[in-house]
């Protein structure tokens, strides 16, 4: 018999490219599924058909994409993703594991591009309809070290190909966000091996899951009391 949650959980995986966040997401999905939980893995941008088209523009556009245009495309993707994927899954008691979400937009377009943090927070709030992630894993390391991992993959996309100064600002942004919300955002050393890191990630995940598995609904998927 599966392990049923009355209300799903929304868990996001953040970090610079090459940080191993996608690997940890996959390991968590495998472990949770083995325990009988309903699990959905997705990504932002690109978790819907609409989002895949936006992702292609955002990461592989051959022409210029100005910072504000870039921000609004990410927000449009997020709004579509929440309505089409996240909210329906949460309503069914599913654990949603998402590769990147609102913190990436704050880190990349806010701290990295220099756009207004307050504006990005306001736009994020509209897109997510008040539903923040229940838990966020941030995988952190020096950008120069992670860039070496990315280089081994082949040709970099538009974000990966930014200069070192940009990635340093993004990293500082992620760490600043984690300092502001230590209960939601848990920081891990991205340079540890996946095998050594996974038990630590699982421990934080289990601490969230254990008291929730048998609780009745306290709110609906859009964060509103019921």
Image (cartoon, grey):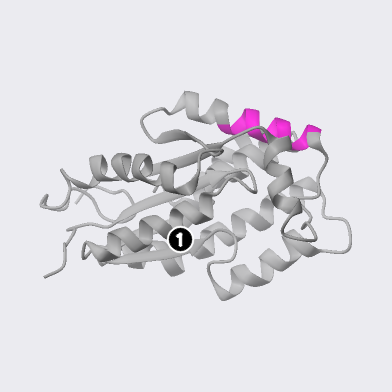
Q: Is residue 205 left or right of residue 139?
A: left
Taking depth in this image into account, of 155 and 88 the one nearest to the observer is 155
- At 80% from the left and 60% from the top, the residue drawn is 155
Mark 1 surroundings: few (<14), some (14-19) or many (≥20) residues within 10 A? many
Q: Which residue is mark 1?
A: 82
- At 71% from the left and 51% from the top, the residue drawn is 150
Taking depth in this image into account, of 37 and 142 the one nearest to the observer is 142
* Residue 188 horizontal/vertical position (percent): 47, 35
Q: Quadrant of residue 73?
A: bottom right
Q: Is residue 104 above or below residue 180?
A: below
Q: Is residue 141 left or right of residue 224?
A: right
Main secondary structure type of the part rendered in magenta: helix
Residue 170 magenta: yes
Specify whether residue 115 is in view. Answer: no
Residue 209 magenta: no
Number of numbered discs on residues: 1
Specify whether residue 114 is in view. Answer: yes
* Residue 185 horizontal/vertical position (percent): 43, 35
Q: Is residue 34 above or below residue 144?
A: below
Taking depth in this image into account, of 178 and 27 the one nearest to the observer is 27
Q: Quadrant of residue 87?
A: bottom left
- Name the quarter where the N terminus is drawn: bottom left
Q: Quadrant of residue 190?
A: top right
Q: Is residue 216 left or right of residue 198?
A: left
* Residue 55 horizontal/vertical position (percent): 67, 64
- At 73% from the left and 44% from the top, the residue drawn is 147
Residues rendered magenta in the picture: 165-174
Look at the numbered disc 1 and give the secondary structure of its residue. helix
* Residue 226 horizontal/vertical position (percent): 19, 51
Q: Is residue 67 above or below residue 37?
A: above
Q: Is residue 177 left or right of residue 91?
A: right
Residue situated furthest right in the rendering: 63
């Amino acid at each position: 018999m599966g392990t049923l949650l009355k209300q799903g959980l929304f868990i996001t995986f953040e970090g610079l490219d090459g940080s191993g966040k996608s690997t940890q997401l996959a390991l968590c999905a495998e472990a949770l599924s083995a325990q009988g939980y309903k699990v959905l893995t997705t990504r932002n941008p690109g978790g819907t058909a609409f989002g895949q088209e936006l992702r292609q523009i955002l990461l592989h556009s051959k022409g210029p994409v100005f910072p504000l245009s870039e921000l609004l495309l990410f927000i449009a993707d997020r709004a579509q993703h929440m309505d089409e994927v996240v909210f329906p899954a949460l309503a069914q008691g599913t654990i949603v594991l998402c590769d990147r979400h609102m913190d990436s937009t704050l880190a990349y377009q806010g701290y990295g591009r220099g756009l207004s943090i307050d504006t990005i927070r306001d736009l994020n709030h509209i897109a997510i309809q008040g539903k923040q992630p229940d838990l966020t894993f941030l995988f952190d390391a020096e950008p120069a070290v992670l860039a070496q991992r990315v280089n081994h993959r082949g040709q970099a996309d538009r974000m990966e190909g930014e200069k070192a100064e940009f990635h340093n600002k993004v990293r500082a942004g992620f760490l600043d966000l984690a300092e502001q919300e230590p209960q939601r955002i848990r920081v891990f050393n991205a340079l540890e091996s996946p095998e050594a890191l996974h038990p630590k990630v699982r421990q934080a995940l289990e601490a969230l899951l254990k008291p929730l598995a048998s609780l009745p609904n306290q709110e609906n998927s859009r964060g509103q009391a019921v």
